[in-house]
Image (spheres, rainbow, N blue to C red):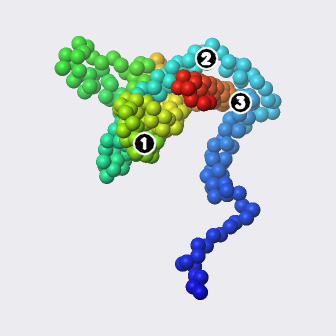
Amino acid sequence: MAELTADTVPIRIHRRGMPRWTMAWPALAWWTVFFIVPLLWIVVYSFGSRPGAEAPGPVALETLSFDNYRQALSEIFFRVFQITMRTAGLGTILCALFGFPVAYAIAMHVPARWRSILVFLLIVPYWTSFLLRTFAWRIILAPQGTLSDVLQALGILSRPLLILDSNAAVQLGIVYNYLPVMILPIYVALERIDTSLIRASMDLGAGPLRTFLQVTLPLAMPGLLGGLVLTFILAAGDYVVPTILGGTKGLMVGNLIATQILASQNLPLGSAMAVMLIGLLAGVLILAGFVLFVLQRLLKLARGAPL
């Protein structure tokens, strides 16, 4: 009879009574301390009031009320919110249009030994300060800058480039800064696709376009949706790019909140605007998710597939 040893018998250790999420407690603790708790403090501050000149602390919490929300519910806030949604939405769409082909080319048409190098080059700009990278565009887009001189020398422009301090410059800055955020999730989803499924589709008579629409794109949809959500949220809450590249014409909700907190020293009103921004963004994402769900159901009905 053969002797049973640790090499021949797999050892299984059962830890009864420990939930599966136990190993995730460091991440949960970090998320709670540095996200949930500060967010709850912002919510509490939004119900406070602006203290007097000699009062201690940034917010007076003796009497809680909805006055800050009533003051924030102004025409100016919703007008700026519309501008923010338009700028962030267009920037997200542009990032998707430019980012998907890049991610597809890297995942599907680049040899495996070069993929990690290209992905590394994508994240290299993030080694530099976000503020410095955005300020660099002021030099590039300046009316007397190199880009303006080159375009005039080529005859493309007859006068200096006048894009700086405009909404177009803000849009350009958002696409530049958040394009890698769109590319990386899409690349991860595409890189995990089993290429045998694509070859099987081609062998069964489907052309390249039909294979892409019915095989590749549905399998890459989780990465695409993740990139859309991440890019949209980051772009909607950004205030560095509008401040540096947009000037007075690049006002977004992030600038409005920063003005109330930093310039006006009105932390309660700024907190109320921040909470409203979070709520409105959540509403927009829920509505977008519902629309995508309905479209998916309609596509299944059109194809004759069971729901």
Residue at coordinates 52% horizontally, 34% vertically from top-left?
A: 225
The nearer-to-camera label among 1 and 3 is: 1
Q: Which quadrant: the N terminus?
A: bottom right
Report how far apart the C-alphas of labels 3 and 2 lie in the structure: 18 Å
- On screen, residue 8 above or below 252: below
Task: Give the residue number, with chain letter if any, for mark 2.
Answer: 78
Q: Which of pointers 1 and 3 lies earlier in the amino acid sequence?
A: 3
Which mark is nearer the camera, 1 or 2?
1
- Please give the name of the residue rendered at 33% of the width and 50% of the height, measured from the top-left corner: 112
Q: In which quarter of the image is residue 65?
A: top right
Q: For residue 285, which quarter of the picture?
A: top right
Q: Distance between the residues labelled 1 and 2?
A: 47 Å
Location of the C terminus by quadrant is: top right
What amino acid is found at the position of numbered circle 3 in the picture? Ser
Q: In this view, does 26 lie to the left or right of 47?
A: left
Whichever of callouts 3 and 2 sits on the residue coming sooner in the sequence is 3
